[in-house]
C-alpha cells in the first residue's frame, strides 16, 4: 500500500502561490529567490524518485503538462516526471495530452483510496490547492511535506485558507536546507486509536 504525500513550497505565512504569477503551478515564484542548497535539491529528487504516481488538480496539471514534456536533465528528474503515471482530478478535462495521464472526474475519495491501495511507493501531490484541501478534509493525506521559505508574502493563495475544520498532524521531521534558512517540515497524519 502506498502513501499519499502532499509536497508544497510555502511562505512562512502559508502562501503557496505567487500572487503576481501565472497561477498555482508556480507554487511560489518567490521561492526561486532562495538557495535551498544541495540538500534541498536532493530532498526534492529523492521525493520524486520514491513516488509511483502523481495526483494533480487540473490547474497544476495543465502547468506541468505545458512545461515538463520539453525538459531534460542528466539526473533523470524530467524522465521520471514524464514517464510516471499521472492522475488529474477534473470535471472539465476530457482528453489529457501528457503521456501516462488518466482523469479522475468522480468519487475522488474512492479513486484516491484505490490508487493508494494499488501503489507500492508514494502518490505525490504538488500544488493543487483545492485538491489538497479536499484530500485533507477526507483524511486521505498520509504525509505533508512543506518546504518553508523565509518570506512573508502577504497576498496570494494560502494552502489551507478554506479548510473545513481542524486536521491534527504530528511532526515527523524538520531540517534546514541550503544557506538561506529554508526549512523542510514533514508531518504525518495524527492517527486516533
Image (spheres, grey):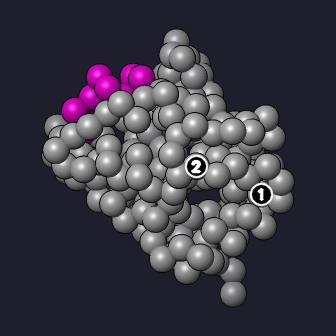
Q: How far apart are labels 1 and 2 at the CA level?
A: 16 Å
Between 141 and 121, the one nearer to me in the picture: 121
Residue span colored magenta = 28-36
Which residue is at the far bottom?
Answer: 193
Magenta stretch contains residue 61: no
Which residue is at the far top?
Answer: 20
* Residue holding disc 1: 108
Between 176 and 125, the one nearer to me in the picture: 125
Image position of 142 (left or right of 79): right
- Whole-percent x, y for residue 124 in the image: 50, 56
Q: Earlier in the sequence, mark 1 or mark 2?
A: 2
Residue at 69% over, 64% down = 112
| Count of all numbered marks drawn on residues in the image | 2
Residue at 63% over, 68% down = 115
The answer to whether any part of residue 185 appears in the image is: no
Mark 2 Cα-neighbour bin, 10 Å: few <14, some 14–19, many ≥20: many
On screen, 143 above or below 161? below
> Residue 165, which numbered label?
none
On screen, 79 above or below 34? below
Q: Secondary structure at mark 2?
A: strand
Q: Secondary structure at mark 1?
A: helix
The answer to whether any part of residue 17 appears in the image is: yes
Magenta stretch contains residue 34: yes
Residue at 32% over, 43% down = 78
> Residue 101, which numbered label?
2
Image position of 128 (left or right of 81): right
- Whole-percent x, y for residue 93 in the image: 73, 36
Residue at 56% over, 64% down = 4
Quarter of the image where the C terminus is located: bottom right
Amino acid at each position: 500500500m502506498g502513501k499519499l504525500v502532499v509536497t508544497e513550497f510555502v511562505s512562512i505565512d502559508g502562501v503557496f502561490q505567487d500572487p503576481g504569477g501565472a497561477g498555482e503551478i508556480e507554487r511560489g515564484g518567490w521561492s526561486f529567490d532562495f538557495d535551498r542548497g544541495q540538500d534541498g535539491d536532493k530532498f526534492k529528487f529523492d521525493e520524486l524518485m520514491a513516488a509511483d504516481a502523481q495526483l494533480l488538480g487540473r490547474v497544476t496539471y495543465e502547468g506541468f503538462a505545458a512545461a515538463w514534456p520539453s525538459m531534460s536533465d542528466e539526473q533523470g528528474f524530467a524522465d521520471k516526471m514524464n514517464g510516471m503515471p499521472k492522475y488529474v482530478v477534473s470535471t472539465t478535462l476530457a482528453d489529457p495530452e501528457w503521456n501516462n495521464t488518466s482523469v479522475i472526474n468522480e468519487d475522488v475519495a474512492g479513486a484516491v483510496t484505490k490508487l493508494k491501495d494499488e501503489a507500492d511507493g508514494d502518490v505525490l501531490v504538488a500544488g493543487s490547492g483545492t485538491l489538497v484541501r479536499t484530500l485533507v478534509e477526507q483524511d486521505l493525506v498520509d504525509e505533508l511535506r512543506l518546504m518553508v521559505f523565509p518570506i512573508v508574502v502577504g497576498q496570494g493563495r494560502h494552502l489551507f485558507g478554506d479548510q473545513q475544520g481542524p486536521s491534527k498532524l504530528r511532526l515527523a521531521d524538520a531540517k534546514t536546507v541550503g544557506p538561506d534558512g529554508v526549512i523542510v517540515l514533514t508531518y504525518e497524519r495524527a492517527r486516533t486509536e
